[in-house]
């Protein structure tokens, strides 16, 4: 009845008809275009899942071909509050919060960025403690502490920009949770560091080159340099751990990176406010997905 599936609304309707709850566009993009002639990939809800450390959302990609065929993929879990990629590293136990309504999209973006930058201080201090617990060298521990110090400066810079645009960054709330097993630490590092922080470093470089606003351009140039070191630390931790892992454990890390990439692709497919995109140097969905493709070929394949 619908003919060729060439509109997001048609793909979402087919997913709904197949019994899936399509994620609201205010939380996740309702669809991710693969190629216009190939149909769409819809993110559908699987419900909430809680453990003693974190509240999670379960999501499943459902591909709708241009001919109307519905194909389900393996579900994945994401942390509460994943609605965009900002510079910084999310710590375990980070509680959900978003900047209060701000009419200026620039203010809202930098307020959320400032919150995550401040939360990243907790992430790197926790990282240093856990690296020491499992016998990592002083070089990795010192790099984690230096990264925490970087994030203090990043939070100050992004807060200043957010306030300039009329937004007040929410103070991050991080639950006090027990130290994790080495497996949990490495899985978190695979997602937060090897994927999300690696991409956010590339994103910051893009902003440093493309931002029309001089203050933002200067700020992102400094942040990009630091975030590149932070991403490098994540890969150094991955390399340090590799000889200690079984084939099955290494496979689990690859799968965690693959799922994190799927989430990032979904997030980056959401068009942003035009003024925010121009002045902050943020990429269009097409450019963002191309950046992800380049990282996948170089690092994640």
Image (cartoon, helix red, strand yellow):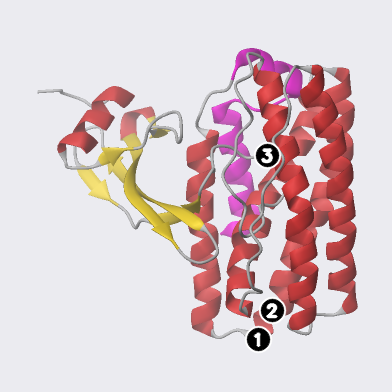
Q: Say if 281 sits above or below 95 in the image.
A: above
* Percent coordinates x, y for residue 89 in the rendering: 70, 52
Q: Which residue position is annotated with label 3?
A: 86
Q: Say if 10 sits above or below 130 in the image.
A: above
Residues at discs 2 and 1 in contact (Cβ within 8 Å):
yes
Q: Label 3 vs label 2: CA separation?
A: 27 Å
Q: Say if 119 sits above or below 203 in the image.
A: below
Q: Quadrant of residue 29?
A: top left
* Residue found at x 53% / y 79%: 249
| Element class at badge 1 | helix
Q: Which residue position is annotated with label 1?
A: 244
* Residue found at x 32% / y 53%: 73
198 relative to 69 in the view: left or right = right
* Percent coordinates x, y for residue 139 in the rendering: 89, 73
Residues at discs 3 and 2 in contact (Cβ within 8 Å):
no
Q: Nearer the viewer, residue 1 or 80?
A: 80
N-term-proximal mark, 1 vs 3? 3
Residue range (magenta): 273-301
Q: Which residue position is annotated with label 2?
A: 241
| Element class at badge 3 | loop
122 relative to 95 in the view: left or right = right
Q: Is residue 228 magenta?
A: no
- Quarter of the image for the N terminus: give it: top left
Q: Residues within 10 Å of mark 3 (few under 14, many from 20)?
A: many
Q: Is residue 295 magenta?
A: yes
N-term-proximal mark, 3 vs 2? 3
- Quarter of the image for the C terminus: give it: bottom right
Q: Quadrant of residue 234?
A: bottom right
Q: Residues within 10 Å of mark 2 (few under 14, many from 20)?
A: some
Q: Main secondary structure of the magenta part?
A: helix
* Residue found at x 55% / y 29%: 286
* Residue found at x 26% / y 37%: 65
């Amino acid at each position: 009845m619908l003919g060729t599936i060439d509109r997001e609304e048609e793909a979402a309707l087919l997913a709904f008809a197949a019994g899936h709850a399509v994620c609201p566009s205010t939380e996740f993009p309702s669809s991710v275009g693969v190629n216009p002639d190939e149909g769409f990939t819809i993110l559908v809800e699987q419900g909430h899942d809680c453990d003693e450390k974190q509240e999670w959302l379960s999501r499943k990609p459902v591909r709708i071909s241009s001919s109307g065929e519905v194909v389900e993929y393996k579900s994945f879990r994401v942390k509460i509050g994943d609605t965009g990629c900002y510079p910084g590293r999310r710590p375990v136990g980070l509680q959900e919060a978003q900047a209060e309504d701000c009419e200026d999209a620039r203010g809202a973006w930098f307020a959320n960025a400032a919150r995550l930058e401040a939360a990243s201080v907790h992430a790197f201090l926790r990282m240093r403690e856990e690296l020491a617990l499992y016998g990592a060298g002083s070089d990795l521990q010192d790099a984690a502490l230096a990264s925490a110090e970087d994030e203090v400066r990043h939070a100050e810079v992004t807060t200043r920009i957010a306030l300039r645009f009329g937004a007040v960054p929410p103070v991050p709330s991080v639950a006090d949770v027990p130290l994790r097993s080495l497996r949990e630490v490495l899985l978190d590092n695979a997602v937060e560091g090897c994927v999300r922080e690696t991409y956010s470093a590339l994103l910051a470089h893009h902003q440093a080159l493309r931002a029309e606003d001089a203050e933002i351009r200067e700020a992102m140039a400094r942040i990009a340099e630091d975030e590149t070191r932070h991403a490098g630390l994540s890969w150094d931790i991955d390399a340090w751990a590799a000889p200690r892992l079984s084939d099955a454990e290494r496979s689990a890390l690859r799968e965690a990176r693959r799922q994190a990439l799927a989430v990032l692709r979904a997030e980056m497919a959401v068009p942003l406010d035009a003024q925010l995109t121009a002045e902050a140097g943020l990429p269009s969905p097409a450019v963002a997905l191309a950046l992800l493709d380049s990282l996948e070929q170089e690092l994640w394949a």
